[in-house]
Image: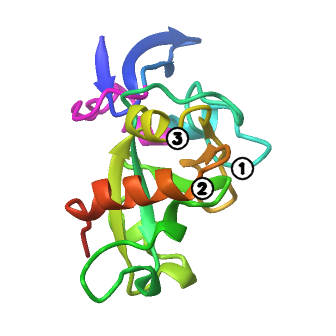
């Protein structure tokens, strides 16, 4: 049994070629990458995985629309104009009914902030459970995009008081590159 950032990985042989079978356990953070396989690095086997019709990438075991587990860590990029002079975060940062976030375990902060509207911005990280707690009735859904195969959305109505509460909660977690 091997481990990756996606969870545990089982290796098995088909026609004398090493293949990878993923069993997703997304919320686990900090697992070591699996070692190279007998016939090359595991990355060489990505072409054997089924490609996603939505993003063209592969994301073992995840399908667009899947709910994310409570312990998955998310990252939200925040445009510079949403950071107030006192260092607080504008409530509008979290108001979007389909709030865009990345899976923090699979994209770097630099990748998250590479979008044109986020350049020069900052970011915060939080768990799915935290988002669901502050925004009851919202779902955190896997929603890959071309160019971002680890994109998710926090979907649902978000009231001003709840956005204010979340913005205040995230203030101490605000980070820059």
Magenta run includes residue 41? yes
Residue at 48% across, 79% down: 118
* Colour option used: rainbow
- Mark 1 touches mark 2? (CB < 8 Å): no
Mark found first going from the N terminus, 1 or 2: 1
Q: Residue furthest front?
A: 161
N-terminal of the pair, mark 3 or mark 2, is 2
Residue 107 is at least partly visible in this image: no
The quadrant in which residue 29 appears is top left
Give the structural element (helix, strand or loop) at label 2: strand
| Residue that appears at 66% across and 45% down | 143
Residue 135: numbered disc: 3
Residue at 24% across, 69% down:
175
User: What residue is at 43 percent from the left and 28 percent from the top?
Assistant: 26
Quadrant of the rendered image containing residue 87:
bottom left
Q: Which residues are magenta?
A: 26-44
Instruction: Please tell me which of labels 3 and 1 falls first in the chain.
Output: 1
Disc nearest the viewer among 3 and 2: 3
Q: Which residue is mark 2?
A: 99
Rendering coords of residue 42 (x, y %): 40, 35
């Amino acid at each position: 049994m091997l481990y990756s950032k996606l969870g545990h990985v089982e290796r098995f042989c088909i026609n004398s070629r090493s293949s990878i079978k993923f069993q997703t356990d997304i919320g686990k953070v900090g697992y070591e990458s699996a070692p190279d396989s007998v016939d090359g690095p595991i990355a060489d086997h990505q072409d054997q995985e089924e490609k996603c019709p939505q993003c063209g990438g592969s994301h073992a075991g995840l399908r667009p629309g899947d709910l994310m587990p409570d312990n998955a860590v998310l990252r939200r990029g925040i445009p510079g104009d949403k950071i107030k002079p006192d260092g607080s975060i504008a409530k509008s940062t979290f108001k979007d009914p389909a709030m865009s976030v990345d899976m923090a375990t699979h994209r770097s902060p630099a990748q998250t902030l590479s979008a044109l509207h986020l350049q020069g911005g900052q970011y915060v990280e939080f768990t799915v459970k935290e988002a669901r707690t502050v925004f009851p009735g919202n779902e955190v859904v896997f929603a890959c995009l071309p160019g971002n195969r680890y994109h998710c959305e926090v979907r649902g109505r978000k009231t001003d008081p709840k956005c204010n509460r979340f913005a205040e909660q995230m203030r101490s977690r605000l980070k820059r590159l």
